[in-house]
Image (spheres, rainbow, N blue to C red):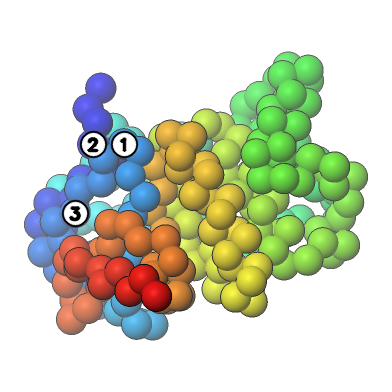
Amino acid sequence: MSSTILELKNASIYQRESLILSEVNVSINKGEFVYLIGKTGTGKSSFMKTLYGDLPLNHGSGHIVNVDLRKLKEKQIPQLRRKLGVVFQDFKLLNDRTIKDNLWFVLKATGWKNKQEMEQKIDEVLEKVGMRTKNFKFPYQLSGGEQQRVAIARALLNDPELILADEPTGNLDPQTSIEVMEVLQQINKNGNTILMATHDYALLLKYPSKTLKCDGQKVFEVVQKTQKQV
């Protein structure tokens, strides 16, 4: 097993016929926490969508969690997503069922059968994000920050090799953003690899880490200026 979780070489990323990013060379290793930054419209979301199979990769080479993105067939996409945890900006929780039932639904959809194991897994991931005591609530009864914690728990259900967090603090106020970030940091310390797209530069200063930037149809690593100590 390679320690490289994600590698793109000379990749070009398209939305239909429009070239969004070209000559993308990116490598992420197991255990890293990596930011993806850039202004709105510079290709962050298209980059993420290519990684979880929403957009095809037709130019260059790309491997993610030992899956060849160039050879990825539509019927293999669910299999790829089981190896990834995806956290969206807008939570994507089902409002007609409780938190526990939201997670149960995902486990059933991804092939889990044993009820006792499913119960244990749900408790385990909710414990990790500090939401175990609220599993009986419905999403609309939770704050935005709590909903995002549940979304992170959902992303952890299948022990993903890589978590893709697409603007996970985009809809949250600064204090709640920090709380959610603390959860992600802890998950990363426990060994999960995380790629997080964000435009929240305050978080980058507070939690410096490897940073990729989308700009001018390119993706490149940038060296962060760390916050000066007062």
The amino acid type, in three-letter code, at marker 2 is Thr
What x and y, as percent, mark residue 100?
A: 80, 41
Whether residue 194 is visible to the viewer of this picture, yes or no, is yes
In this figure, which residue is indicated by the disc labeled 2?
Answer: 4
Q: Residue furthest front?
A: 230
**Contact flag, marks 2 and 1 (Cβ < 8 Å):** yes
The picture places residue 211, in percent across and down from the top left corner, at 28, 62
Residue shown at 56%/54% (left/top)? 182
The relative height of residue 111 versus residue 105 in the rendered view (above or below) is above
* Label 1 crowd bin: few (<14), some (14–19), many (20+), radius 10 Å: some
Left or right: 22, with 91 as reference point: left
Distance in Å between CA atoms under marks 3 and 2: 10 Å
Name the disc covering residue 119, or none. Answer: none
Q: Is residue 47 visible?
A: no
- Residue occupied by mark 3: 26
Q: Which residue is mark 1?
A: 30
Q: Secondary structure at mark 2?
A: strand
Q: CA distance from mark 3 to mark 1?
A: 14 Å
Asked if 173 appears above or below 73 in the picture, the reply is below
What's the amino acid at mark 3?
Val
